[in-house]
Amino acid sequence: MLLAAVTAASVVWIRDGAEGHVFTAADVPQAPVALVLGAKVEPDGTPSPFLAGRLEIARQLLAAGKVQVVLVSGDHMNWDYDEPDAMRRWLVERGVPAEKVVLDHAGFDTYDSCARARRVFGVRQATVITQSFHVPRAVTLCRRLGIDANGVGDDTARRYAEQWRISTTREYGAAVKAAVDVLSGRDPVHLGRRETGVDDALRAG
């Protein structure tokens, strides 16, 4: 019963934190930065359909002038698995200027991506992009960590019904972890030094 109560409270906290800050790609307000959260990359370096759906939204927002820079944040803990580089390559192959894409190689989970966006890359306002079942948690975490964040969720991967269902169910446990992370105020797994990639890309126009 205690676990159920904690989970329910965490889910409510996330939903309340994201209230009024989740949009479609068509109606999301402008922001200087799109923060694209990482997801699985196939062994050949191809983004999974879930990740490709996120990247396509970022491409659309950049093309529409709703963001100026794309910060791709993902897992590169092992030398032979590199989400951020795969994300950049996907975007550049589809016409996004390479200088508009900034890489965060230590976005090991949603909390780390949001914390590093603020503390390492100096992001103060962003549109965070992920799947629709995940976007309330991502928005709430980013906002609690000091970013004026709105979110856009991808639904194209919903066609992978079984994986979508499993991922949606996992959000309940992830909600508890998110609340614990915020309450503990933990540092990201790898905080690192301040990086100017986002600032430089914004100044370059």
Image (spheres, helix red, strand yellow):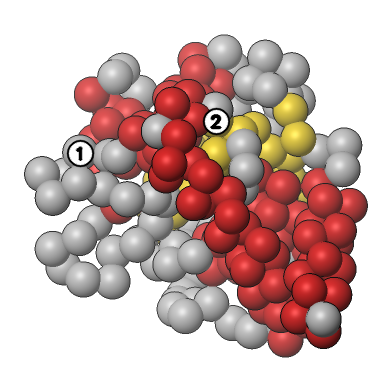
Crowd tier of the residue under label 1, counting other residues whose Cα lies within 10 Å: few below 14, some 14–19, many 20 or above: some
As displayed, is residue 25 above or below residue 36?
above
Residue that label 1 marks: 46
Residue 176 seen: yes
Q: Please tell me which residue is depicted at 82% across the width and 51% down the height of the picture.
A: 15
Which of 48 and 30 lies nearest the eye of the viewer? 48
Question: What type is the residue that disc 2 sits on?
Answer: Asp
Residue that label 2 marks: 154
Q: Position of residue 191 (x, y in %)?
A: 49, 77
As displayed, is residue 115 above or below residue 42?
below
Label number found at residue 97: none
Q: Position of residue 183 (x, y in %)?
A: 78, 81
Q: Position of residue 124 (x, y in %)?
A: 71, 51
Which of the 4 image quadrants contains residue 10? bottom right
Q: On the picture, is 154 further left or further right than 9?
A: left
As displayed, is residue 152 above or below residue 25?
below
